[in-house]
Amino acid sequence: MITDNGLRMPKLGLGTFRMKGEECRDAVLSALSIGYRHIDTAFMYGNEDAVGDAIAQTSVPRADFHLTTKVWWDQLSPDAMQASLDRSLTALKTDYLDLFLIHWPTPDIDLAASLGKLAQIKQAGLARHVGVCNFPLGLLRRAVEEVGAQIDVHQFEYHVLLDQSKLVKYCRSKGIAVTAYVPLAQGRLADHAVLGEIAAKHGATTAQVALKWLLDQDGVSAIPKASRVESQTSNFGALKLVLDDADRAAIAALPKDQRFVSPPFAPDWNA
């Protein structure tokens, strides 16, 4: 559990990108039944209604799980952000969020206006915590040091093949929790030789090794997408894995220059 800034965010969550309809509803229901208590969605995913159906049907009390959603980059004016939040709350069948995030920055983002609106949403109790996604280090610094924004969580691509040490270090220095998305490098780790050796040593899977490497880091959570019960159960098993110093050294030695999520509207990652 991450508890920075009053958060109570389970380190391992369920990502729902590209899940729709019954598949998404059933995936959320099965994850909650397995023991997941952290569900991540977004307005852009087009599945908030399905997640909401699962929330309505589960026997897990709403207060017992963490729910995140996000506002899309074309809705970052204060009025548009409020409208997006209202739609999300209705679709999700809840009267509050645990975390509300700006999904992507834009080149012309009015940081003061957008982050000020996030603060108002938090103050109103509509979201208990707020934050951003996909902010490069320079933009995050501006948000925190120039605008003075309170950012509780920063969500960005992070896995064993991508070095995000500078961003993680800065977040840690400011008490900002990190959520790693695509923590399994979009499925590219299944046949990874080094991770395979570590997995074989522990009787684990490569996915469990990759997840535990993230989950062992202070203030870092991960939200692997998994629609199948078997995959959800296997990922959940990463929490029990114990990596040793040799494992961590082997992972540290891997090339970490592979970014897999960089759409045309992405910011300059080196800014």
Image (spheres, grey):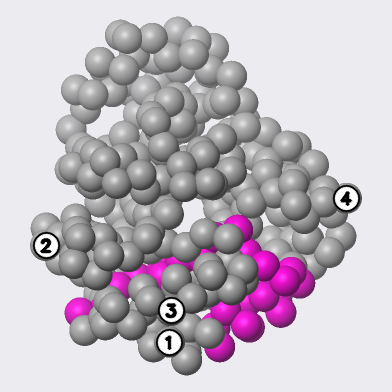
Q: Position of residue 244 (x, y in %)?
A: 38, 9
**Residue at the disc numbered 3:** 117
Is residue 59 a member of the stretch shown in magenta?
no
User: What is the CA distance from the residue labelled 1 to the residue labelled 4?
Assistant: 35 Å
Residue occupying the point 70% across, 49% down: 65
Quadrant holding the N terminus: top right
**Mark 4 — residue?**
59
Neighbours of disc 4 within 10 Å: few (<14), some (14-19), many (20+): few
**Relative to 98, residue 214 above or below:** above
Comparing marks 3 and 4, which lies closer to the viewer? 3
Decide whether residue 95 is among the magenta residues.
yes
Which callout, 3 or 1, points at the residue further toward the start of the chain?
A: 1
As measured in the structure, the alpha-carbon distance from the residue carrying label 3 to the one carrying label 4 is 33 Å
Q: CA distance from mark 3 to mark 1?
A: 6 Å
Task: Decide which of 196, 61 is in the foreground and name it.
Answer: 61
| Quarter occupied by the C terminus | bottom left
Task: Check if mark 3's residue and mark 1's residue have beta carbons within 8 Å.
Answer: yes
Type of the residue with mark 4: Ser
- Looking at the picture, does residue 270 appear above or below residue 212? below
- Separation of disc 2 and disc 3 at Cα? 24 Å
Quadrant hosting residue 231: top right
Q: Are marks 2 and 1 in contact (CB under 8 Å)?
A: no
Marked residue nearer the N-terminal end (2 or 1): 1
- Mark 1 or 4 closer to N-term? 4
Badge 3 or badge 4: first in the primary sequence: 4
Question: Which amino acid does the dot numbered 1 rest on?
Answer: Pro
Relative to 19, is 105 on the left or the right? left
Contact between labelled residues 4 and 1, with CB atoms less than 8 Å apart: no
Q: Which residue is identified by label 2?
A: 271
Query: Do the numbered discs 3 and 4 sit on residues whose CB atoms are within 8 Å?
Result: no
Q: CA distance from mark 2 to mark 1?
A: 25 Å
